[in-house]
Image: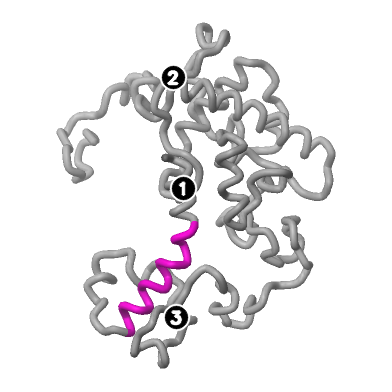
Amino acid sequence: DGYPGDGYPGDTGDAPPGAGTGNLADLFEGMYIVPESDAAEGLNLADCFSESIYNTKDAVAELDTEEEMLCAFIAFQVNKNLSEPMGVGRYHDVDEATERFGYFKTCVGEVQKVNEEENGWEAEINFFCDLSEEEKSLYHSNGMPGSGDNSYLKKRHPNGFPDDGYPGDGYPGDGYPGDTGDAPPGAGTGNLADLFEGMYIVPDSDAAEGLNLNDCFSESIYNTKDAVAELDTEEEMLCAITVSLVTVTLVMVTLMTVT
């Protein structure tokens, strides 16, 4: 990566292009593509890399001109959370960026409209905002709001939970379709097997009978070198595959979207 002293492969001991020079456009090169737009020519890219341009209600409300929309769209690209199995990653070319800029502007308008109406919940710019209706419908068909209404724009809890976007999740006051006002089965009771019902299937295994499923829903079981090294018995293997199945639907949706 070129940053001095960080120990990553490819460390040259020198700062990357643009570091320390004020040339943020070079520093973030490869993380964004400027779409075709009449506003592109006069745009100061150095002003267009902060999430603060679009990640609050007040900031979104101020997005009015083509130049402001374009600046927000570039910041949206730079700040994509590529570790989340959601949405699309980096764009391939200017044509794709231009197409997705259109989706983004439509989404900004929808977020502004929801927040102006003050219906008891706040909308935000999120990973749905550069998706086509067809791409959003993939999430909708897999149990998440993604097409047909604007609930997919609901502002999420900072850690993504409980306002995680699943319809019918039952968390009180989260405003998603199917919200019952009551906690879902297992919430607050330690019964995680009920809480995650439908997101995993226990395979045939001799270890299944004595398995405590409540211990099998954390990624920490398999997502570090040390954790994987400790996977030895049939029961440990079964526990690890159970937690991996909890997220496999979202991963498959992402693969379908990207391809």
Residue at 63%, 58% (x, y): give it: 166
| Callout 2 amino acid | Val
Q: Nearer the viewer, mark 3 or mark 2?
A: 2
Please state if 226 lies on the left or on the right of 160 as rendered.
left
Q: Which residue is mark 1?
A: 254
Quarter of the image that includes the C terminus: top left
Kindly indicate whether the residue at mark 1 contacts the one at mark 2 (C-beta within 8 angstroms).
no
Residue appearing at x 35%, y 85% in the figure: 205
State left or right for residue 69 relative to residue 178: left
Q: Give the magenta part as a residue range.
A: 235-249
User: In the image, residue 13 lies at what x, y percent?
Assistant: 16, 34
**Residue at the image position 57 percent from the left and 74 percent from the top:** 197
**Lateral position of residue 2 relative to residue 174, left or right:** left
Which comes sooner in the sequence, label 3 or label 1?
3
Q: Quadrant of residue 57?
A: top right
The residue indicated by pointer 3 is: 215
Q: Measure how far apart labels 2 and 1 are at the Cα level.
A: 22 Å
Q: Is residue 221 above or below residue 112?
A: below
Which residue type does callout 3 highlight?
A: Asp
**Residue at point 38%, 27% (across, down):** 28
The percent coordinates of residue 44 (x first, y second) are: 50, 14
Q: CA distance from mark 3 to mark 1?
A: 27 Å
Q: CA distance from mark 3 to mark 2?
A: 47 Å
- The residue that label 2 is drawn on is 94
- Residue 26 location in percent, x, y? 34, 21
Across the whole image, how many numbered discs are drawn on residues? 3
Q: Earlier in the sequence, mark 3 or mark 2?
A: 2
Main SS, magenta residues = helix
Q: Position of residue 245 (x, y in %)?
A: 43, 67
> Which tag is nearer the camera, tag 3 or tag 1?
1
Where disc 3 sits, the SS reads: helix
Q: Is residue 236 magenta?
A: yes
